[in-house]
Image (cartoon, rainbow, N blue to C red):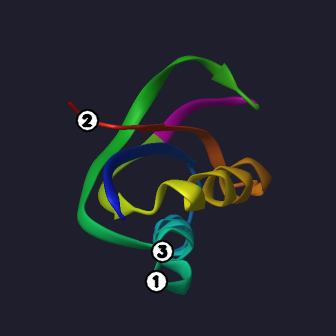
Amino acid sequence: MKKSYELTFIVQIDANEDAMQATVDQVKAWVEAEDNGQVIKIDRWGRRRLAYEIDGQREGFYVLFEANIEPDHIPEIERDLKLSSEVLRYLIIRPD
């Protein structure tokens, strides 16, 4: 049974806007892989200053997904996010 989750992640700032969009599309594909999830809403917060420097980056592109995901699919999504060189940080939570 799918449950509601919020996935927030920070994409590394590139000179190319298409590369950032490709990363957002890739994360969406990971969530929706094998029909284990469905992205309901994508909220692009845009470029923001980071609280502290991460991998030499002082700014990042923030994105929030609201999605319905199978709970046993979460570890696979987290693994993909950890391995991605474009994603600086991520957080997956269950909203109240």
Q: Secondary structure at mark 3?
A: loop
Which kind of residue does numbered mark 2 sit on? Pro
Residue 71, image x, y percentages: 49, 54
Q: Secondary structure at mark 2?
A: loop
For the residues bearing labels 1 and 3, Cβ distance under 8 angstroms? yes
For the residues bearing labels 3 and 2, Cβ distance under 8 angstroms? no
Of residue 44 and residue 42, the one placed in the foreground of this image is: 42
For the residues bearing labels 2 and 1, Cβ distance under 8 angstroms? no
Tell me where the magenta segment starts and ends, as one range. Answer: 56-60
**Residue at mark 2 to residue at mark 1: CA–CA distance:** 21 Å
- Dominant SS of magenta comes to strand
- Looking at the image, tell me whether mark 3 or mark 2 is earlier in sequence order: 3
Toward the bottom, the furthest residue is: 34
Left or right of 31, for residue 80: right
Which kind of residue does numbered mark 3 sit on? Asn
Q: Residues within 10 Å of mark 1 (few under 14, many from 20)?
A: few
Residue 93, image x, y percentages: 40, 36
Rendered residue at 50%/39% (across/down): 60
Residue where numbered disc 1 is placed: 35
- Looking at the image, tell me whether mark 2 or mark 1 is earlier in sequence order: 1
Q: Secondary structure at mark 1?
A: helix
Rendered residue at 65%/50% (across/down): 78
Residue 36's tag is 3
Residue where numbered disc 2 is placed: 95
Rendered residue at 31%/60% (across/down): 67
Rendered residue at 61%/58% (across/down): 77
